[in-house]
Amino acid sequence: MAKLISGKEVSAKVRAEVKEECEALKAKGIRPGLAVIIVGDDPASRVYVNNKKKACAEVGFVSEEYALPEQTSQEELIALIGELNSKPEINGILCQLPLPKHLDEKAVINAISPMKDVDAFHPSNVGRIMIGDYHFLPCTPAGVMEMIKSEGIEVAGKNCVVIGRSNIVGKPMAMLLLHENGTVTICHSKTKNLKEVCAAADILVAAVGRPKFVTADMVKDGAVVLDVGINRDENGKLCGDVDFAAVEPKASYITPVPGGVGPMTIAMLMKNTLMAAKIQNEL
Ligand code: NDP
């Protein structure tokens, strides 16, 4: 039976640390600020934005929400980002993705000042992560690493397999495991022998976006299984990319969905915003 790595517990610890540091900053007259931009009325995005605002309030940050209508133009959105880039009370800027189809996501990400890019999506931050000289790490992969570390799981020399190669999760996840000296394989929809590749993993990260995609025959006995997926199953119930009931008995550690990687993502966003405030105040 696997030990559950609770994202609720690990994220609460991260948030408590951020809150403590935030209080120390307040004593110096500094209050970290996060601006969250949401365009349109996608219900999932609304839930994420509300959770981010709640987390800001909990750790003591200022949060500003910019809820823009669906038909907002590229120019209007870029102009708002420009204003926030030069607003001293705002240390972090986040534009909730996905954006409506008429907006150019890449251009929007590029418009955010790299020093305020607390999602770490800007090409300059992506490059910094590649060479291991970074201020911010992308929140979801950083959250997965925090969960691994919370259990003292050694990554060095381990066979690490990441399923998924998105810019937001899969690729940076692989890079962070590599920085910890894992031997990393990235799988995607064109991977041959996916089952065999996964079954050789000591550490398996699933970031596919398909309910219960990782089945027991894809998991080695004693593997550490981290489930990034957020999906709905056939009954509309929230579930991950891993068939939890079947995989859990084989794994040594496993993350649940919900209550796993999800809460970590927001906690790491708080950590990045705190870091941004420190850097911008030359601390
Ligand atoms: P993407 O859709 O951008 O990427 C999915 C990846 O899975 C792609 O690289 C794709 O391969 C690969 N894939 C799809 N089908 C297969 C297959 N049959 N075999 C092997 N690989 C396959 O998703 P994201 O990376 O953005 O997100 C992944 C999941 O994580 C989603 O469920 C998302 O909701 C969740 N998520 C959770 C977060 C959290 O906070 N917990 C944050 C962000 C995402 P290819 O590149 O070849 O198409």
Image (cartoon, rainbow, N blue to C red):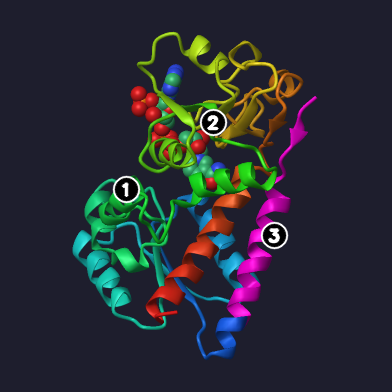
Q: Quadrant of ligand 1?
A: top left
The answer, for residue 47, to whether it is visible in the render is: no
Q: Position of residue 74 (x, y in %)?
A: 21, 59
Residue on which the image places disc 3:
13
Give, as a three-letter code, the residue at label 2.
Val
99 relative to 21 in the view: left or right? left
Label total for image: 3
Q: Which class describes the residues within 10 Å of circle 1: few (<14), some (14-19), or many (20+)?
A: few
Give whichever of 175, 71 is nearer the camera: 175
- Screen quadrant of the N terminus: top right
Which amino acid, by three-letter code, is at mark 3? Answer: Lys
* Local SS, label 3: helix
- The dominant secondary structure in magenta is helix
N-terminal label among 1 and 3: 3
> Residue 237 in the image: x percent, y percent?
67, 33
> Which residues are the magenta region?
1-23
Q: Which mark is residue 206?
A: none
For the residues labelled 3 and 2, the Cα–Cα distance comes to 22 Å
Percent x, y for residue 218?
A: 58, 14
Question: Which of label 2 and label 1 is nearer to you?
Answer: 1
Residue located 62% across and 27% down the image: 233
User: Is 9 colored magenta in this rendering?
Assistant: yes
Q: Is residue 151 visible?
A: yes
53 left or right, relative to 69: right
Q: Is residue 155 above or below residue 250?
A: below
* Residue 131: mark: 1
Tell me which numbered mark, 3 or 2, is placed earlier along the sequence: 3
Q: Amino acid at mark 1?
A: Ile
The quarter of the picture where residue 243 lies is top right
Task: Between label 1 and label 3, give the one nearer the viewer.
Answer: 1
